[in-house]
Image (cartoon, rainbow, N blue to C red):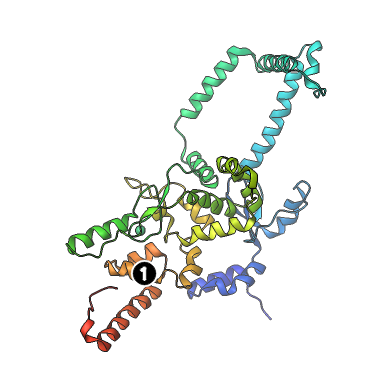
Amino acid sequence: MAVPRASSLKKFLSAVSIDPSAYQEFLERANPVVLVVCPKCGRIRPMKKGLLKFAGRRVRNRHELRRRPDGRYERLCRLCSAREVGRKALRSVNQKALERHLRKEDTWVLEDDPPGIGRATKTTRSRIVRNAREASMGGPAKLARNRERFRQMVNAPKSAEHREAIARGHIVHAVLTRPFFLCHLCGLLVYGHRWHKPCALRSLYWRRKNRGDGHRPVALGRHAGRHAARNYRWLIRRRAGMSKRELLNESEKGLAPYRARQRFKRRRPSESTVTKAIAAFVRLLPGSWNLLLSVGGHKKHRRGNHFLQELVPLPLELHPVIESGARDALIRRLHSFDMPPAEIVRVTGADTQRIRRVIANIQTSATLRVKSSPSRSSPNDPA
Ligand SMILES: [Zn+2]
Ligand SMILES: [Zn+2]
């Protein structure tokens, strides 16, 4: 039997517009290319499957590349790998230079501490090390010049590529400076603002058209709570390849004041805490990253949103939430404020079919109500 090659099957499926997910297993098996992701910076690139064995041999202590649950393999990208090698080399070069600049009678500072070392000895040691280190780097004048050069380099205009790299680093480390809110109209997460832009405009139109109407979009908005930022970080860093254990260890520092208060009954959060927190965050995500994190102003999209999309594709990620019907009430609510279906798609992440079905259900149930109890009829009441 002739078996189609993965690439030609993929081309065929897209030509006749068939959803390739049904063939995913076959495609994965037949596709001679795997995806490799850099655990340091999140860069994703394809690699020939045949090279897996050779790449694995170069991993220390493992003899194979680590495979993530999504089927991607972990391998440092060229830049991160060069950085790692360079840093190690620099450390040993620096150490050797330091040793060369120590006087013979001072070499004791390189040895391990004897058990009962006093404070005076510690101070002497750090003074000797500091002086030798300075001398090994070319003396104080040269160090000052280097520092100045570094400052200039940091402030210099950066290339587009360099900016990309910085943005990617920020995303993977989930750097946030402002809080999350729940949008007043849709109740979904929004970063740094009280509204999603389309929701704010929609409610403005509604209020202008229906002056004096009691139906107002005020009930849902509030601060998203102190865990939202942590949950965001967990979601992103988990998808970037960190284990739940690593995430918990990392956030122990962040929980310090809380922990100090509860020193006597300290509970260690379990890995299911991470799973639940991530699920809770996903349940509140809007249909696109550009709605959650927008910059407004002249820039359409925040730099780095496309890395987020690579890590957590929206609205795909919301599929189970929407299929469970958890967003149907929201669809009804947005429709009740005359939000057009295309915008409901954008905000909720539900597809047009589901939205049409939910809206049709409101209309049939409204007609039924009118038929069964004409006295209480209010067909225009969006309920
Ligand atoms: Zn990298
Ligand atoms: Zn909204």
Which is nearer the eye, 31 or 328? 328
| Figure quarter occupied by ligand 2 | bottom left
Which is nearer the eye, 198 or 24? 198
> Dot 1, crowdedness within 10 Å: few (<14), some or many (≥20)?
many
Q: Is residue 206 left or right of residue 8?
A: left
Q: Is residue 117 left or right of residue 382?
A: right
Whether 347 is drawn above or below 354: the answer is above
Residue at image point 81% right, 11% down: 105
Q: Secondary structure at mark 1?
A: helix
Residue at image point 23% right, 62% down: 206
Query: In the rendered image, which quarter contains the C terminus?
Result: bottom left
Whether residue 38 is visible to the viewer of this picture, yes or no, is no
Per the image, the residue denoted by label 1 is: 331
Rendering quarter of residue 217: bottom left
Q: Is residue 220 left or right of residue 119?
A: left
From the top left corner, tell me how far across and down residue 306 is, in percent.
47, 52
Furthest-front residue in view?
264
Residue at image point 71% right, 55% down: 51
Which is nearer the eye, 315 or 142? 315
Query: In the rendered image, which quarter contains the N terminus?
Result: bottom right
From the top left corner, tell me how far across and down residue 8 is, in percent.
58, 70
Residue at image point 43% right, 52% down: 224
Furthest-bottom residue in view?
372
Whether 227 is drawn above or below 219: the answer is above
**Residue type at mark 1?**
Ile
